[in-house]
Every structure is written in structure tokens, then in C-alpha cells.
Image: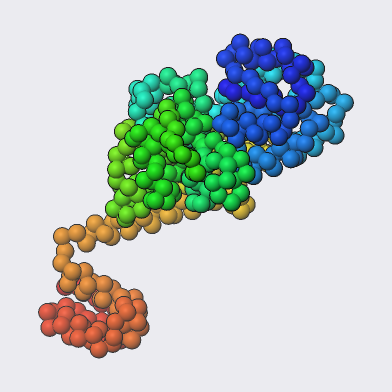
Amino acid sequence: MRLLIIGALEGQLSEATKLAMAGGAKVAHAPSIEVALASLRAGHGADLLLVDVMADIPGLIAGLEGERFHVPVVACGTETNAAAAVNAIRAGAKEYIPLPPDAELIAAVIAAVARESSDFLFRDPAMARVVRLADQVAPSAASVLITGESGTGKEVMAKYLHTRSKRAGRAFISINCAAIPEALLESELFGHEKGAFTGAVARRIGKFEEASGGTLLLDEISEMDIRLQAKLLRAIQERVIDRIGGTRPVPVDIRIIATSNRNLADAVREGSFREDLLFRLNVVNLRLPPLRERPGDIVALAEHFVAKYAKANGLGNRVLSEAARAALLKAPWPGNVRELENTLHRAVLLAGGESIGPEAIAMPDGTGLTEVVQAASLVTQAAQAAQTVTRAMVGRTVAEVERDLILDTLDHVFGNRTHAANILGISIRTLRNKLNQYAEEGTSIPAPGEQRTTAA
């Protein structure tokens, strides 16, 4: 845990920071927001910012977002600064801590941030197998590729690996390759020198250097431009990087973890992903199963989210009814854990009392959970029916299947040749020729206005 204190808080937080340092946190100080941002640019990362509530917190949040630094902010101030505290929270601060501080409270906030980053809740055997493999490979230096649908918890798994690795005491840096424009991603990864391009007003350390000694997560790596993949491959192989505008290579010592919600083997065949880079990244593959394949996790996760958001919103105890649990298990959850979390957060707020029933669990568009379950059941039934029809065709010739389709369609329209031809997408002449052929083979053909009474 790396803690950066901004503003005139050093003296007031001395006891709390001593407690944090005793717990293994690294604490640094910056007298102003400008100095803090310069420190982040220089690669001195932070996992949590403690900021004087009287500082320009909206400006700090804007600066962090503008330079793509993703760090939670906690404001600190005297209890009489109620308006400033409200403004800080509205600007984007995660918490507000009154001063003089309770050292135990500071330690609890730090622990909560650390725990939020590495918690991994599971109960299902399918997920347990993945976690066992993760525990085996975590202490190694091997690159790991984490795959799975969106919302399955790939970034959480990456943090889980880091906290159980030999690099756990060092930096964990993540970068979303899909969220950053192609023109900026190279600078984000490898850094740049002052004047390297228009807008490069100061040297900036890239994620590779910031993560040196620790772990670098390349999130959604399948979205990286193939031209940049060549430079990434060299960095992974040689353990050196070149800043944009730099004159000499910079050595780095990192472990690479990458994630993707796409099949990278398919991307290689399509020419959008380098095969040699895939080999480098895919030393170990952890495939996270979608929520529908790990039903044992659904109720456990749901209970966790209910407790979490009831506490976060200052509500009393909330529990899921048995009917709600049953409905949650039947829902398809295409958005996986992320969708489940958002749905339960909404349910906590909509529940009329302590018990959360199915009626309180709704989708963003207002659709009730019961309706979603019914729709999912209909889709499943349709898919099963289609599968049954498909299996019934196996072992039959195309001519036999075509004959039955034409005759069934003719039955459907009571022998009307014109309507049947339109439905089948063929000409009336072709249909008549087919019917003449079937009649010659001894098949009963319905007359106009009739249906078949016998079948060959």
C-alpha cells in the first residue's frame, strides 16, 4: 500500500501514518497538488491520496482524470468544515475523515482500500479449480493470461495473483488498453521525454517503469494496435523499454499479467494479434467461467453485495428472501458478476424493508427479475427445440429434408402454391417442378385448400 499525503496534514496525521507504516504501508508527502501530480508523473505511484479538505479537490480530481491516474482520494479536515466535506465528496473524493484523526479510523480506511483491491469471493467448484491454479502460479515470475467474458472478475483475479506473489510488497499497476486512444497508449506504457511531441510539457514515466519491481496488468490487451504489439514484445523479451523521444533504453523488472474477453487464437488467425506475443503472454492461462457456469457463487456474491451496499448507504440489515435467492439462481446474468453487483445495489435501495424479495430486484430498464427469468426460460426452450430439430436432421439426405420442408410449408398454407413459394423463397415454377417430382415418387401432395392426409 502506497499512501500519498497532500497539503498541510503531515503533523496532524503523524500518529496515523506511523500506524499505517507499521502495517507495511509506504507513506510519502507532497506540499501541494502540483507537487503530487509531478510525483505521479515521475512514476512514484500511490494507491491512496489523503488530501486536505481545504485544498482544490475538484482541481485534483480533474488533474488525475486528465492525466489518466486512477487513484482513490480521501479528504481530511476539521469537523466544522461540513460544507467543504460535502463539496469534496461531490467532486469525487471517496471518503471524508474528520480531524483530529482517529488513528484506528485511518488504518481501517487504508485496510478497506487494500481489501477492496484483492478480495476474491467464490464457492463454486468451477471457480475453486481456477483459484487453485492461481495459487500454484502466483509465486512464480511467469506471465499469466486471464481470459473470460466481460464482468467475470479478471482484474480482481490479477490483483489476487499479485497479492500472493513475491512482488506483493511492490507496485501493482494496471492500464486498460481499450480505454486509451491508440495515439496515447504508447506514451502511457513507455513514457516520454519533454518535447517528444506536441503537448509533452514534461518528462513522464510510463507504466512499465512505474511498475518496475512489481506487476503490470495489461487489461483488454486484445484491443492494442498490432504495430504497438511489436514494441511490447521487445519490452517483455528484453526487459528494457524506450521512452518516446528518449536516447537510451531503460531496464525494467516486472511481471506481466494480461486479460482479454476475446479469443486471442482467433485474433491471431485474423491477423489482429501477433502470435509471438501470444506465446509470451500465455505461459499460464486462467479462464474465468461466466456466472451461469458457476451457480454456487451467485448467492454468496449476492449476499456479499447486499451487505456491502446496505452498509455503504447507511441502511439497516438487509437479507435476501428465499424466493429472491431462487430467482437469482435462474437468471442468465449475461453481464456476469458486474451485472449481479449493480442489480443487488439497486435492490438494496428499492427494498421496502429488511427482506429483499424478487419484486425489489429489477433491471436498469425496470424489467423485473421474474420477467427476466421467464424470458430466459423461453429462450432456453427455443434453443432446445432448435437443437432437437437439428438432431432430427442428422443421418438424412439434403433431398429428404428439402422435401419435408416443402410439404410441411404447403400444409401450413392449406395447399396454396403461391404462398408456399413466397415463404420458401423460391419461384412458383420451381415449386411445381418439385411437387411433380414428389408425386411421381408416390408422395401425397395436398390439393389447393387441403392438407395432407397421408405421408410417404
Q: Nearer the viewer, residue 423 or 166?
A: 166
Residue for point 35% across, 49% down: 273
Residue 421 vertical position relative to residue 107 in the rendered view, above or below: below
Quarter assignment of residue 15: top right
Estimate the x, y position of residue 357 in percent, counting from the top left.
61, 38
Q: Residue furthest left?
A: 441
Residue 432 vertical position relative to residue 54 in the rendered view, above or below: below
Estimate the x, y position of residue 291 in percent, counting from the top left.
44, 39
Residue for point 28% across, 60% down: 389
**In which quadrant of the rendered image does the C terminus lie?**
bottom left
Q: Residue furthest front?
A: 247
Left or right: 455 with respect to 136? left
Residue for point 29% across, 53% down: 269
Report the number of numbered marks.
0
Residue 178 vertical position relative to residue 86 in the rendered view, above or below: below
Estimate the x, y position of residue 121 in percent, counting from the top left.
49, 27
What colour scheme was applied to this rendering of the protein?
Answer: rainbow
Residue for point 61% across, 40% down: 202
Res 266 seen here: no
Quarter assignment of residue 340: top right
Q: Nearer the viewer, residue 206 or 389?
A: 206
Q: Residue furthest bottom?
A: 429
Res 453 seen here: yes
Estimate the x, y position of residue 167 in percent, counting from the top left.
45, 21
Residue 370 vertical position relative to residue 157 in the rendered view, above or below: below
Q: Nearer the viewer, residue 300 or 58?
A: 58
Q: Residue furthest right?
A: 80
Quarter assignment of residue 35: top right
